[in-house]
Amino acid sequence: MNRPSARRVPPPSAAPPACTGTPLPGAQLPDTPLPGTPRPGAQLPDTLRPPLARALPATRTLARALHAEWTKLRTAGGTWTALLALVLATAGLGAAAAAGVSCPAAGCGEDATRLALTGVTLGQAVVVVLAAAAVGGEYGTGMIRTTLAAVPGRGAACTAKAAALTGAVLLASTAAVLGSLLAGRLILPGSGFTPAHGYPPLSLGDGPTLRAAVGSVLYLALVALLTVGVATAVREPAAAAGVVLGLLYLFPLLTRVVADPDWQRRLQQVAPMPAGLAVQATTGLDRLPVPPWTGLAVLAGWSAGALLLGAALLRRRDA
């Protein structure tokens, strides 16, 4: 039988096959880059740079964030209603307080300016509800993710939100305080607060009255900042409003429960509301537990602490 002849296998080629795709392991790439590829160390054009590298300067970023927060605030449902309620509640309660008191001929010992500004104690509740809803509402709707995506710097986002809200409260508070003083100027003389009894008409030309008016506007703005900090930390509108309202109204109740006069004075010196509203006093300053501007500084300390806490938690937590 004839056996089939064995096939002759050609010897392997010493040269590697040509490859135009992925280089073999250990192969060295040419020093000359491909056409259109930037050389090492070359600066990329703006269109090829990543978004974070094309970030705007801090001032422009803050300005745009402030514009966005103001747009959200003024277009949100209920903002203008709350600001109008702030004006009406503050001026209305002040007018009611002026009409509900009488000063006999023997004298009444009342602080007319502080009496006309009584409505600030009610207007601050409207400020708390507005600020808590503006900040905490974003967490409920998920809008906070969009906000932080548009403004990656969380400090800038928090600053812009606080500035926009405080600006709106300042404008409404100015109208509310002026309305309260106007109502007191018109109503108090009919209640016996006349120059004959030692009560000239309320006027911003009087130094203590001007200080009380400016201090009341700043007081409401600081209450707004306090609420912004608490709402940022709590992330729930109802809970944030409850915490701030408790801080404001609980301390005056404690001072009435505590029987020791020394402890009463200490509580009034550190409590946000009693200390802050000391700026409204125009008579009997020596009997105040804390001087007017010092009391407002106490409230500013509470607001600063709340803002720092809220900003720190905002940086550490996810949206």
Image: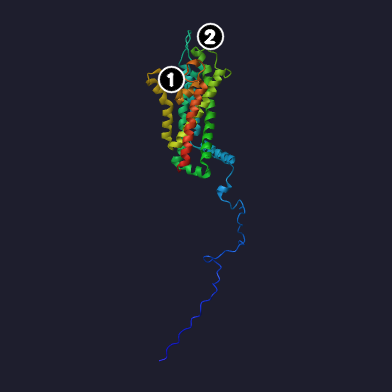
Mark 2 element type: helix
- Residue at horizontal 49 percent and vertical 29 percent from the top: 301
Location of residue 255 in the rendering, given as x and y in whole percent from the top left corner: 40, 21
Location of residue 312 in the rendering, given as x and y in whole percent from the top left corner: 47, 38
Counting residues from the start of the chain, the first of labels 1 and 2 encountered is: 2
Which class describes the residues within 10 Å of circle 2: few (<14), some (14-19), or many (20+)?
few
Type of residue at label 1?
Arg
- Residue at horizontal 45 percent and vertical 22 percent from the top: 269
Which class describes the residues within 10 Å of circle 1: few (<14), some (14-19), or many (20+)?
some
Closer mark to the observer between disc 1 and disc 2: 1
Mark 1 element type: helix
Name the foreground residue: 283 vs 127. 283
As drawn, 217 above or below 15? above
Give the residue number, with chain letter if any, for mark 1: 265
Q: Can residue 60 be seen in this view?
A: yes
Distance from disc 1 to disc 2, alpha carbons, whole Å, reads 34 Å
Location of residue 66 in the rendering, given as x and y in whole percent from the top left corner: 55, 38
Which of the colour schemes (rainbow, by chain, secondary structure, one colour) is used? rainbow
Name the foreground residue: 4 vs 317. 4
Give the residue number, with chain letter if any, for mark 2: 196
- Residue at horizontal 47 percent and vertical 34 percent from the top: 229
Location of residue 206 in the rendering, given as x and y in whole percent from the top left corner: 57, 17
Q: In which quarter of the image is residue 249?
A: top left
* Quarter the N terminus occupies: bottom left
